């Protein structure tokens, strides 16, 4: 008797769902022996024999569903273990995996499989996704198009329906599997780059929430993942308020030592809080996540110093990675904070008594124009090279103790209207308090807290 | 046209020919059963009357629950009727307890199936009466040359089973399927169930089992996978025979008729003619219509090559020029996939348009996607560079540069920007009204917001109901000619206008 059958019998008698699920894992060490234990001719008879006499299988429907499931599983094991190593036909494996999933679905619809066997559903859905990805990869290498992952998403959806449509009393309901499957669907849709479908789930889900236990009652691992995806969906919809709530929830609940998950959550939470709270990640936080540090450190530095040109450079430098992670457009908007910091420095540089009325020209100088007249359209930029021009624009920042804004030789000119436009933006967005008097070419700042929330 | 089949029955006598017999027989299958039929079935239900305390098996209760679980309200009535019929039939045949309700297809599924057959039946009827050809010649729609009769009658056969279940059940029992080991065990359950409910029917258990088996087999036919109707084979590309250069667009409702479809070499000439006509006449509604029929002919013949790209590109440009974003988006969607399949055209130009279009629809997810797919070489193309800059200055609220970019947009980009310039002006007005106090020179607004003249600017302000806030001021030393605009009071007006402008973005046929 192969160990796999023994495990199966033990799991069924002790009602050990996790153990039962592990049978269908690709990491199951017994799979190889199982694959070699028999052949296509004998497999059904063998399975029937090996699992005979179990009390749990007295019900004929339950029994036949398990037979079907194990036979399907053996076929996959056969393909993966006995086929020729690297040349495994993932297409065939995928078809087999699909049959396995359908056998599992029948197990729940007709075979009365109890809810504690849910790990079996998890494992089979998970494997379907993995095999679909491998199969698509293989097809792509051969220059063919393959849409197995899309297909897999549809089949995983069947499992989702199985979960939410179960009307058994809640303590023995398949509803407990809902979030695991939903998370798997999220994962698949994100891989497919169709956030729209992910949003669809979030639209469908509330309808079935009524007779479901509260989210907190589910396993933590399910909640963390679910909240993470909710947060990312909100993030992508620019709903930063909700994104912050969801992601913070996920972060707080996340297992302390799962660095990878925390890293994923923070990838979206950091840009979110930069926008919502104008808070940069602390060096201590970033030091614990080297990957995040390389991702965010350069840009955070330029925000802090208010060096707009360096900000643009940092954004361009990281563009590929930012775009890949879908945080580019969000990070781009943090330029406002960098600009606020720059303007704030201009104000602080003024004598105490002049701080409420500042010529727009001062800001223009700070933005890098030494006043050679406004000739033509030029890019937004910032130069700070200590060569103060007529007004000592460089000195003021050095007085602030910042060292970042030097050694960028080229100076960019910014038209006075553009400076005004950006100042007006600051005021409109509530980052500065005051108004522009165009006749006097002056920015009139509020005497109290001209830069709300910055102690100035 | 003759009366629809559900009304033609019984009211007039001229439908006695063979073609209509089948219609009469199938009346109850129509998606809208006639009233008196419905009531008839109801009065025919003796079972509930015989046993005053009607009991239902739990499985049946589940079945009913499942039926209404995801039933859209508009279909509820029809589904209810169908459900009633199923249960009544089951009672009449006394199989309520032996039937495996959990395997029974839901009434929705059965109805959907019937709708399909009803439709095919109508097509077939028209064919039989020889009317179809005439009708199709007039409308441009035509029956598929591939509709094969045997196929069609198969579908009808299936339905006869469903319909005649009541009367002709015995004919099937002549060939009982040999049940295998598993099926036998399946059948044990209803038998055991009968011990608890002995009063159900006179039929022998054996007959009941067979019947249950039959239901099960029929149920299989209705499984979701097979529920989608077999569409007549349209995989084989069709080749047109029409030689006309011009053709009006008609939305096809059935498979195309090769006589009305122009082959590729004719279409190539058509395009040349259309280009000439557009230059000389510039009649957009005519051109658009012609392009649509041209595109349709390409589609139905499964033609995909660089010529198709050209057609879509030209149509897209014309649509842009006329501000027809819906039509433009359809072309863009097609172009997107054509480029991806490797057909050549002006991909960079249209990438730039797409960026601008995504700005217009505020589609951030797709924008992210597009940015991720841009190559470094793409970013060096002038039009794409321009479009990307538009995007980035808008994100920064830098209206000053935005309106500069508007004035120097390359190719057709300006037309696309037209679609969101008005909206961005309102957004810019909000910022200006908040940032500048106490008032602002109209000339400044004209320049900053890219108006062609002060008059245009004043018109814009008046259109937004801010006319009252414009005032003439004589300058300090008595210099007149300074028209000012009061910013503080205008802020709420433009906040409202901005909100309205951003809330309704046309997302027709969104890619």
Image: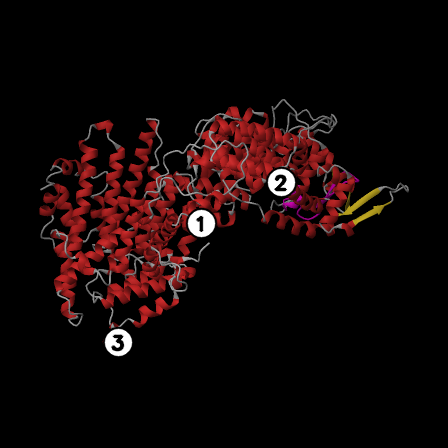
Seen from the viewer's position, the closer of residues B348 and B149 is B149
| Side (left or right) of A329 relative to A216 | right
Looking at the picture, how far across and down is residue A194, in whole percent? Answer: 43, 41
Q: Which residue is mark 3?
A: B49
Q: Which residue is mark 1?
A: A246
Secondary structure of the residue carrying tag 2 is: helix
Question: Pointer 1 indicates a residue of which chain?
Answer: A
Circles 2 and 1 on the same chain: no
Name the residue furthest top: A409
Q: Residues within 10 Å of mark 3 (few under 14, many from 20)?
A: few
Mark 3 vs 2, N-terminal side:
3
Q: Residue A21: in sight, yes or no?
A: yes
The magenta stretch spans residue A122: no
Marks 3 and 1: in contact by CB < 8 Å?
no
Secondary structure of the residue carrying tag 1 is: helix
The number of numbered discs placed on residues in the rendered structure image is 3
Question: Pointer 2 indicates a residue of which chain?
Answer: B
Marks 1 and 3, how far apart in space?
58 Å
Q: Residue A348: in sight, yes or no?
A: no
Res A442 label: none
Render colour scheme = secondary structure
Q: Residues within 10 Å of mark 2 (few under 14, many from 20)?
A: many
Res B419 label: 2
Secondary structure of the residue carrying tag 3 is: helix
| Residue segment shown in magenta | A425-450
The magenta stretch spans residue A434: yes
Q: Tell me where residue A40 sits by quadrant.
A: top left
Q: Mark 1 or mark 3: which is in front?
A: 3
Q: Tell me where residue A371 sits by quadrant.
A: top right
């Amino acid at each position: 008797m192969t160990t796999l059958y023994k495990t199966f019998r033990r799991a069924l008698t002790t009602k050990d769902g996790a153990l039962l699920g592990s049978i269908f894992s690709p990491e199951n060490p017994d799979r190889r022996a199982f694959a070699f234990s028999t052949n296509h001719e004998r497999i059904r008879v063998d399975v029937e024999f090996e699992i005979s006499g179990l009390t749990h299988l007295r019900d004929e429907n339950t029994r036949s569903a398990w037979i079907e499931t194990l036979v399907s599983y053996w076929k996959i094991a056969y393909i993966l273990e006995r086929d020729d190593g690297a040349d495994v036909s993932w297409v065939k494996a995928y078809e087999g995996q699909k049959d396995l999933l359908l056998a599992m679905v029948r197990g729940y619809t007709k075979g009365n499989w109890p809810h504690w066997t849910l790990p079996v559903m998890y494992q089979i859905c998970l494997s379907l996704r993995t095999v679909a990805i491998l199969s698509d990869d293989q097809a792509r290498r051969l220059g063919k198009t393959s849409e197995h992952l899309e297909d897999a998403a549809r089949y995983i959806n069947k499992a989702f329906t199985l979960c939410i449509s179960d009307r058994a009393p809640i303590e023995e309901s398949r509803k407990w599997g809902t979030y695991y499957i939903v998370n798997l669907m999220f994962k698949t849709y994100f891989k497919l780059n169709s956030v729209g479908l992910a949003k669809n789930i979030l639209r469908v889900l509330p309808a079935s929430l009524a007779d479901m236990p509260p989210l907190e009652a589910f396993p933590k691992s399910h909640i963390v993942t679910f909240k993470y995806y909710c947060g990312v969906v909100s993030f992508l919809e620019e709903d930063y308020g909700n994104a912050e709530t969801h992601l913070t929830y996920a972060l707080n609940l996340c297992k302390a030592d799962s660095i990878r998950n925390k890293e994923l959550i923070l990838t979206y939470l950091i840009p979110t809080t930069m926008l919502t709270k104008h808070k940069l990640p602390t060096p201590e936080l970033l030091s614990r996540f080297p990957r995040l540090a390389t991702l965010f450190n350069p840009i955070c530095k330029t925000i802090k110093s208010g060096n707009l040109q360096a900000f643009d450079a940092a954004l361009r430098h990281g563009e590929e990675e930012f775009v890949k992670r879908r945080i580019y457009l969000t990070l781009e908007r943090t330029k406002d904070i960098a600009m606020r910091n720059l303007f704030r420095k201009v104000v602080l540089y003024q004598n105490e008594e002049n701080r409420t009325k500042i010529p727009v020209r001062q800001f223009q100088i700070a933005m890098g124009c030494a006043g050679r007249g406004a000739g033509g359209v030029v890019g937004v930029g910032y130069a700070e090279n200590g060569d103060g021009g007529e007004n000592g624009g460089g000195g003021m920042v050095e007085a602030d103790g910042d060292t970042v804004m030097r050694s960028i030789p080229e100076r960019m000119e910014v038209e006075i209207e553009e400076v005004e436009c950006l100042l007006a933006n600051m005021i409109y967005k509530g980052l500065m308090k005051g108004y522009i008097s165009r006749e006097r070419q002056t920015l009139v700042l509020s005497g109290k807290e001209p830069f709300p929330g910055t102690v100035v | 046209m003759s009366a629809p089949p559900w009304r033609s029955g019984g009211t007039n006598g001229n439908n006695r020919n063979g073609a209509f017999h089948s219609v009469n027989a199938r009346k109850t299958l129509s998606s809208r059963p006639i009233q008196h039929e419905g009531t008839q079935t109801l009065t025919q239900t003796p079972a509930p009357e015989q046993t005053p305390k009607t009991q239902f098996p739990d499985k049946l209760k589940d079945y009913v629950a499942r039926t209404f679980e995801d039933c859209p309200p508009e279909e509820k009535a029809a589904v209810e009727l169908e459900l009633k019929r199923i249960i009544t039939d089951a009672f009449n045949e006394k199989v309520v307890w032996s039937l495996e309700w959990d395997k029974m297809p839901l009434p929705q599924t059965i109805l959907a199936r019937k709708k399909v057959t009803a439709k095919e039946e109508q097509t077939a009827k028209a064919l039989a009466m020889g009317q179809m050809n005439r009708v199709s010649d007039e409308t441009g729609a035509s029956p598929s040359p591939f509709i094969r009769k045997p196929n069609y009658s198969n579908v009808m056969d299936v339905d006869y089973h469903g319909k005649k279940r009541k009367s002709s059940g015995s004919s099937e029992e002549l060939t009982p399927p040999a049940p295998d080991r598993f099926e036998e065990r399946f059948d044990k359950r209803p038998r055991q169930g009968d011990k608890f409910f002995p009063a159900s029917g006179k039929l022998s258990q054996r007959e009941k089992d067979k019947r249950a088996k039959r239901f099960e087999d029929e149920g299989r036919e209705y499984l979701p996978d097979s529920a989608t109707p077999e569409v007549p084979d349209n995989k084989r590309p069709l080749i047109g025979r029409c030689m006309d250069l011009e053709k009006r667009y008609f939305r096809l409702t059935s498979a195309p008729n090769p006589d009305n479809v122009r082959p590729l070499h004719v279409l190539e000439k058509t395009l040349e003619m259309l280009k000439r006509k557009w230059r000389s006449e510039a009649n957009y509604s005519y051109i658009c219509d012609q392009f649509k029929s041209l595109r349709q002919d390409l589609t139905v013949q499964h033609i995909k090559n660089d010529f198709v790209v050209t057609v879509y590109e030209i149509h897209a440009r014309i649509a842009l020029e006329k501000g027809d974003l819906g039509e433009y988006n359809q072309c863009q969607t097609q172009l997107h996939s054509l480029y991806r399949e490797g057909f050549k055209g002006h991909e960079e130009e249209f990438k730039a348009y797409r960026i601008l279009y995504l700005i217009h629809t505020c589609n951030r997810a797709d924008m992210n996607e597009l940015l991720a797919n841009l190559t470094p070489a793409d970013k060096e193309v002038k039009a794409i560079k321009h479009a990307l800059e538009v995007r980035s200055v808008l994100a920064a609220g830098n209206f000053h540069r935005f309106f500069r970019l508007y004035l120097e947009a390359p190719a057709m980009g300006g037309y696309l920007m037209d679609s969101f310039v008005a909206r961005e002006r309102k957004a810019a007005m909000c910022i200006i009204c908040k940032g500048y106090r106490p008032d602002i020179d109209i000339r400044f607004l004209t320049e900053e917001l890219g108006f062609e003249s002060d008059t245009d600017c004043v018109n814009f302000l008046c259109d937004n109901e801010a006319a009252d806030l414009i005032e003439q001021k004589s300058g300090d030393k008595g210099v007149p000619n300074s028209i000012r605009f009061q910013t503080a009071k205008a802020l709420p007006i433009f906040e409202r206008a901005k909100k309205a402008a951003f809330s309704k973005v046309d997302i027709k046929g969104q890619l």
